[in-house]
Structure formats: structure tokens, C-alpha cells
Image (cartoon, rainbow, N blue to C red):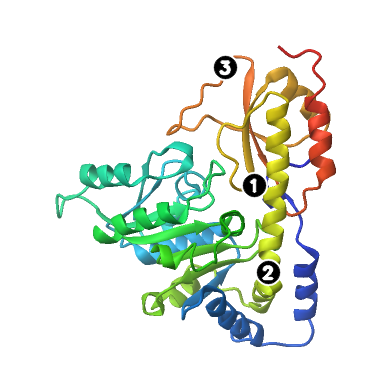
Amino acid sequence: MEFDSDNAAGAAPAILDAMVRANAGYAKAYGDDAITRRLERRFCELFERDLAVFLAGTGTAANALALAHLTPPWGAVLCHSEAHAIVHECGAPEFYGGGLRLVGVDGDSGKLHPATVAAALDRHFGLRPHQIRPAALSLTQASECGTVYRTGEITALATLAHDRGLAVHMDGARFGNAVARLGVTPAEASWRCGIDVLSFGATKGGALAAEAIVVFDPARADALAERRKRGGHLISKHRFVAAQFEAFLSDGLWLRLAAHANRMADRLAATLAAAGFKPLWPVDANIVFVLLPLALHERLQAGGAHYYVTHAHRSDPVNVPSGFVLARLVTSFATTEMSVDNFISLVNRREGLP
């Protein structure tokens, strides 16, 4: 009953097998190997266009380097007030960006909306040279609430940002979960909606440690290779990161793994709702938020269930009544139906509950 995080799961066997194969013999270092070259071509095929791609080992590195590349030190990145980049990356974008500023914007269900983004742009900026200048908009897909932007929502936000002179970044740590849910192509979920740079995550989806910065206009990627190197994120034995991604993208594995995680979240959400605990937000990806009575929470913990008790989101206030906790449950490619059913069997033991 492991619902702490999709980062708590191991790596998919096919990805480990690919790393073992990559271990045979010698290969050029720092991304000059044959696997990396094949992967670069595969990314172009996947997204149906020429692009530039840069691999990194962590999602924080991918986000920080991407946002630093899009934003000058006197610039600002607008993002959701609960976005990973502003809440859980320990100032990495600001550090790598030489002092750029992240500006949180509220939005219900973990998503930004054009009206509030426009209001933030009107309220915070414009007095040059005395104020920082907005440079980028960052969207998290899937969001921190487990919701997914529809393509029309992305297009509306990207159009607003481009009209105001901002680049658009997508934190796609769970991009696979979003694409699997939407049933669209990777291109339709990204650059065709106006995304300029995508942090494409594989780690949460089943890799060991593999993230990609995808720049859809290769000209915009000028000097990003040096930025990655200077930031300490050019991995010398690069073939092992590339091998993970090559296996991840092979024969649609990434989407199958994501679809399984989504199905397990759907099963968890449906059975919780049937037990009287309806999720707080739509379960679009692999994350379920639910209010649990404290007595039930303690029983679940004693029974071996693992999940996070989290805070109420400031931008989407949740009233956590006395005697309740707000639980975040995350499924993964490795979650089994049995683990969900065991969890629900503990939930359905009603003794001691209000």
C-alpha cells in the first residue's frame, strides 16, 4: 500500500534492461555516444518536428535550467502558487537564473486561468526600469492537484503569454500521465498548443533518473548546452541516461506505464468515493486528494499504508475539519490492484469512525 509518491517506485524492468545493454563496452562520453544520437532523432519523430533536447538527471535540474534559459536575471516567471518550481525546488530556478524571480499566481484545482494571469501581469509589472520584467509563464502538467490542462486551456494561456511577450514553459514531470489521459499526441499536448520549452519527465513514469529539456525551436536552444555544463548537469556517462529514455519511448512504453498509473488512481478514487470519501479535485492523472477522519488515518498508517498528509492549498482553500487530515495518494506504474483493494478494505472497516 505504497502511495507516498511515484518517485518511491522502482524502475521499470525494460528500462533497467536497457541500461544493462548500454553497459556493454565503451562509448563516447558527454552525450557524443550513439544512443544519445538515436534518442535525439527519436524525440524529433515523437514531437513531429525539428527540436533540441538536453538530458538531465532530475526534474529540478530540468526546470531550473529551462527557466533560467528563458528568463534574464531581471526577469520573472509566472507560475501557479503551488507549482513545484516555486514550492519544492529550494530556489533552484532563481539560483540558476542568477536572481530571476518566481511569481506565484492563484488558480483553482491547481491550474492557472487567463484572467488571473492577465491580472497578475497588469498588477505587478510595467514600471521600467524599476520593476522586474515578466519573461516566462510556466504551466505544470499534470498539476500539483492531479488535474490536467486540456489542450484548449493550454492554448488560451500560451496565446495570452505570447501576446504579452512571454515564453511558455511546461513542467512535464507527469507529462506522460497527462498525454495518456487526454488521448492526444505529444505534439498536440505541447508545441501545437504554444509550449516553447518542455521539461519532459521520465523518472516518475518508470525511469531510474532521466529528465529532458525539450526546446521546440532549436534556435532558442543556443548556449543551453553550456548552461547545462556550467550548472553541473552534463552527465559524463551520458549513454545511461539516454538508454533510459530510449527504452521509455520505445513502442509506447511511457504511455502504457502512465495509463496503468492513471487506472490505479481511478480505481482508488472510485472506491474511496463509494466508501463516502470523495476526492477533492478531479482525478485526471495519478494523484488523489481526500479528507480522511483522523481515526481512519491512524488505522491506515498502522495497517501499513503509506501516503502524505499535506497542507491545504492556499490558492484553492480546503476546509480541513477538526479530526480530519488531508491525504495525498499517488499511484505509479508499479501500483497493483491488490494494493488498492487492500487499502480500501482497511477504509471499509467502519468501527471507531465518526
**Figure disc tally:** 3
Amino acid under disc 2 = Gly
Disc 2 target residue: 252
Crowding at dot 3, Cα within 10 Å, few <14 / some 14-19 / many 20+, comes out as few
The disc, 1 or 2, on the residue closer to the chain's N-terminal end is 2
Image coordinates of residue 113 in percent, x first then y, are: 37, 45
Alpha-carbon distance for marks 1 and 3?
25 Å
- Position of the C terminus by quadrant: top right
- With respect to residue 314, does 20 lie above or below? below
Answer whether residue 335 is visible to the viewer in this image: yes
Secondary structure of residue under mark 2: helix
Q: Residue 286 got which mark?
A: 1
- Position of the N terminus by quadrant: top right
Crowding at dot 2, Cα within 10 Å, few <14 / some 14-19 / many 20+, comes out as few
- With respect to residue 195, does 308 lie above or below? above
Image coordinates of residue 273 in percent, x first then y, are: 68, 29
Image coordinates of residue 157 in percent, x first then y, are: 35, 53
Q: Residue 246 got which mark?
A: none
Q: Nearer the viewer, mark 3 or mark 2?
A: 2
Relative placement, left or right, of 58 versus 110 is right
Relative placement, left or right, of 157 versus 270 is left
Crowding at dot 1, Cα within 10 Å, few <14 / some 14-19 / many 20+, comes out as many
